[in-house]
Amino acid sequence: MSSRRMIILIVAVVVAALSAFGLLTYVRGIDDAAQAEDQAVQVWFVTTPIAKGTPASEVIEQRLINLDDIPVRFAPATAIKDPDEELKGFVAVTDLPPNTILVDGHFVSPNVVSTGITDRLAERDMVSVTFSVSQIGGVAYLMEPGDYVNILTEFPIAREEAGITEDVATEESQASFGSDEFIYDRSEADTMSYDVRYIYQKAEILAIDKRLTADLGETAGEAAAEGNGGMITMAVPPEALQIILGIGKENLYLSLVPQDYVPYPIPPIDLRSEGALLPAEDATRLTPYVSGEDASTEAP
């Protein structure tokens, strides 16, 4: 055999050996990962139903929980490891059915579980205000306890009170649209049928009907109660209650806002401004989403 053939044969053998070694290493890695996932770890299971408010000491004493093995991949990161220490002085925050893995949050301080509406008001030195809204005035009942809303009021416009006469409608006003000028004889006051004002911004909903903001460890669904969603209770300072009642509960309109909404002063509509442009007639207010120099920006 020539030396050239001998070199080719040696190289082929080396390449085959390296390939076999790489494949073996890869397979072993997969096997090790699978074994690691199947490795058993001990967690505490609920063996007998635990009622909301049950002290952890009673749960441990009566052996309502038991330590058992499960694959590590199924073990929650917040699983309780030492009930005697981690749950000391706590009570169950909600009903716990059998086979529930005990995790952080299932047991909390007793004053959290017993917190009712008066306790929640006392936490922030608030009082309650309750009023009913229709589906139109109440965001189609899509609100949940804990949501934030802007509160508005609306009243039908009395033309004589707004300082508006029939003569105003005959006065011509002039507006510029690009290079053209448009003559119209309508004032903003003639267009508006209601005087709409903001009362408060970013007010927190404490309850809807008899459904409170969910306790710690409880979901909104678990806290739900029967109702039509139109009876709203808010936690407000005493002076805010006085203003809301003074305006009239039947004149309230709610508008949902996100949690990161930042309130800012919103002036009332100037009903006495004769010949005022409506937003779509004003180059700086063409859409609800932009104003001023941003008027050319597309809506989100």
Image: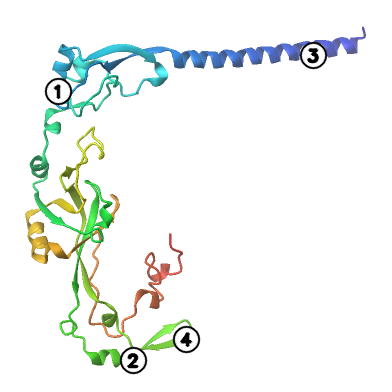
Instruction: For mark 4, give the secondary structure.
Output: strand
Q: Give the residue type at disc 3.
A: Ala
Q: Earlier in the sequence, mark 2 or mark 4?
A: 2
Instruction: For mark 1, give the secondary structure.
Output: loop
- Residue depicted at 16% across the width and 12% down the height: 62
Pick the quarter of the image with the N terminus: top right
- Residue depicted at 43% across the width and 63% down the height: 299
Q: Which residue is mark 1?
A: 54
Q: Residue 262, can we see it?
A: no
Which of the labelled discs sits on residue 180, or is there none? Answer: 4
Q: Earlier in the sequence, mark 3 or mark 2?
A: 3
Which of the labelled discs sits on residue 172, or is there none? Answer: 2
Q: Is residue 7 left or right of residue 85?
A: right
Q: Earlier in the sequence, mark 3 or mark 1?
A: 3
Q: Residues within 10 Å of mark 3 (few under 14, many from 20)?
A: few
Q: Are marks 3 and 4 in contact (CB under 8 Å)?
A: no
Residue 61 position within the rendered picture, expressed as x and y whole percent measured from the top left: 15, 12
User: What's the CA distance linking mark 1 and mark 4?
Assistant: 76 Å
